[in-house]
Each structure stands twice: as structure tokens, then as C-alpha cells.
Image: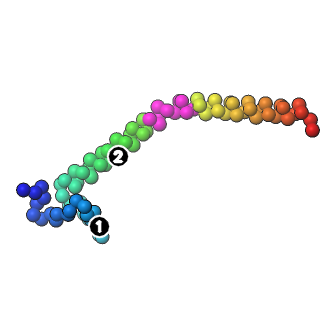
Amino acid sequence: MTPFSASEPVVPQTVIPVLTHSVQPDNLSASVLAALDRQHAEKAALFALAGKLQDSLKPELERLTQELVQKTLQTAWQQRASDVSDPI
């Protein structure tokens, strides 16, 4: 017994079908709709996780950015001070 109904075409697993026209959801099998729903839920969960990670990293990124700016300005000031003390 196959998992497909008689009305569904059987496509060999080595062949990837190419859609040449729009397929309406009414024409999709329940298993395809379930797979699409599962994929949509996985995508939503991934993007939710990414948002949470970004929110949790904001304070650290701000701290690192402030530290980088401070060190860059200190280096620039030291370079300027050494240029002024060494006349040409």
C-alpha cells in the first residue's frame, strides 16, 4: 500500500518537479499543506529567536561600541599630541 491516493501523481524521489503555473491551496494534498505550515512555524520560531538574541546582545554591543569609540579617540588624541610636539 502506498501513502498516496489514486488521484495524486507519484513522482520518483530523484526527480524534482518544476512548477509551470500557480497552484491553489485547494489543489495541495493535506501532507503538503502540513509540511508548509510546519516550515512556516519553523521560520517564525527562528526569527523570534533571532529577535530575542538581538535584544539580549544590545547592552553588550553598546558597551563594546562605547569602548571602541573611546579608545579610537584616545589614540587619535595621542597621535595629534605627538604630531604637535614634533615640529617639522
Q: Residue at 79%, 30% (x, y): give it.
A: 78
Left or right: where does residue 38 sit relative to residue 48? left
Residue 77: quadrant of the picture: top right
Q: Amino acid at mark 1?
A: Leu
User: Where is residue 43 shown, x and y percent of the image?
Assistant: 35, 46
Secondary structure of the residue carrying tag 2 is helix
Seen in the picture, residue 43 relative to 24 is either above or below; the reply is: above
Q: Residues within 10 Å of mark 1 (few under 14, many from 20)?
A: few
Residue lying furthest left: 1
Question: Which amino acid type corresponds to the residue marked 2 in the rendered image?
Answer: Lys
Taking the image as shown, residue 57 lies to the left or right of residue 24, namely: right
Q: Quadrant of the N terminus?
A: bottom left
**Which span is picked out in magenta?**
53-62
The residue identified by callout 1 is 19
The residue that disc 2 covers is: 43
Image location (x, y in percent) of residue 51: 43, 39
- Residue visible at 85% across and 35% down? 83
Q: Magenta span: helix, strand or loop, mainly?
A: helix
